[in-house]
């Protein structure tokens, strides 16, 4: 699910000390805002600030969602980015296997401490 037009809502809520609605409080239009059908290998490109959420996995198969996030340097230098919940998420052992050039792109997202990368 992706809630288009909400890219500034989370920022405004954080600045004003407000919380975002939980699943039971979401407007009906948000709950119906799904991206389907999607086939294996399909790609979703969205602004990372757009509110989004998963949909139920109704199979007995594990469903993986690889994610790449990019931000322009002006956004990274902005006051808005300073309030963004951005935590390192790349395990050190994976970072160490990247080429030097790729490490340059990813140096701010590597976590040198152990990460829980399992699934539940």
Image: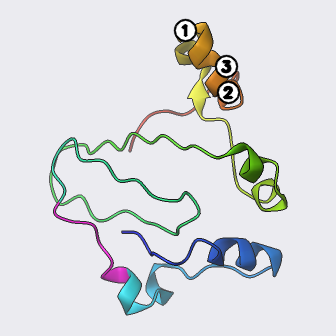
Where is residue 14 shown, x and y percent of the image? Answer: 76, 73
Where is residue 25 shown, x and y percent of the image? Answer: 49, 88
Where is residue 97 shown, x and y percent of the image? Answer: 52, 8
Q: Residue visible at 45% across and 75% down?
A: 4
Where is residue 112 shown, x and y percent of the image? Answer: 70, 21
Is residue 19 covered in magenta? no
109 vs 62: above or below: above
**Mark 1 = which residue?**
99
Left of 105 or right of it: where is 42?
A: left
Give the camera-side residue of 118 and 14. 14
Q: Callout 2: 10 Å neighbours few (<14), some, many (20+)?
A: some
Mark 2 lies on a secondary structure that is strand
Mark 3 lies on a secondary structure that is helix
Frontmost of labels 3 and 2 is: 3
Q: Quadrant of the N terminus?
A: bottom left
Upstream in sequence: badge 2 or badge 1: 1
Q: Distance from label 1 to label 3 (Cα)?
A: 9 Å
Give the camera-side residue of 44 and 93. 44
Q: Callout 3: 10 Å neighbours few (<14), some, many (20+)?
A: few
Q: Which residues are magenta?
A: 31-37
Magenta span dominant secondary structure: loop
Q: Residue visible at 81% across and 82% down?
A: 16
110 vs 101: above or below: below
**The quarter of the displayed image where residue 82 is located:** bottom right
**Mark 2 = which residue?**
111
State the mark number for residue 67. none
24 vs 81: above or below: below
Q: Callout 1: 10 Å neighbours few (<14), some, many (20+)?
A: few
Upstream in sequence: badge 1 or badge 3: 1
**Mark 3 = which residue?**
104
Q: Quadrant of the C terminus?
A: top left
């Amino acid at each position: 699910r992706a809630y288009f037009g909400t890219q500034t809502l989370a920022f405004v809520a954080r600045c004003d000390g407000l919380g975002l609605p939980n699943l039971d409080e979401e407007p009906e239009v948000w709950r119906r805002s799904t991206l389907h059908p999607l086939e294996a290998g399909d790609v979703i490109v969205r602004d990372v600030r757009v509110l989004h959420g998963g949909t139920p996995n109704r199979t007995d198969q594990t469903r993986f969602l690889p994610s790449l996030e990019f931000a322009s340097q002006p956004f990274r230098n902005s006051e808005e980015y300073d309030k963004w919940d951005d935590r390192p998420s790349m395990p050190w052992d994976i970072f160490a296997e990247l080429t030097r050039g790729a490490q340059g792109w990813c140096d701010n997202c590597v976590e040198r401490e152990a990460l829980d990368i399992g699934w539940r």
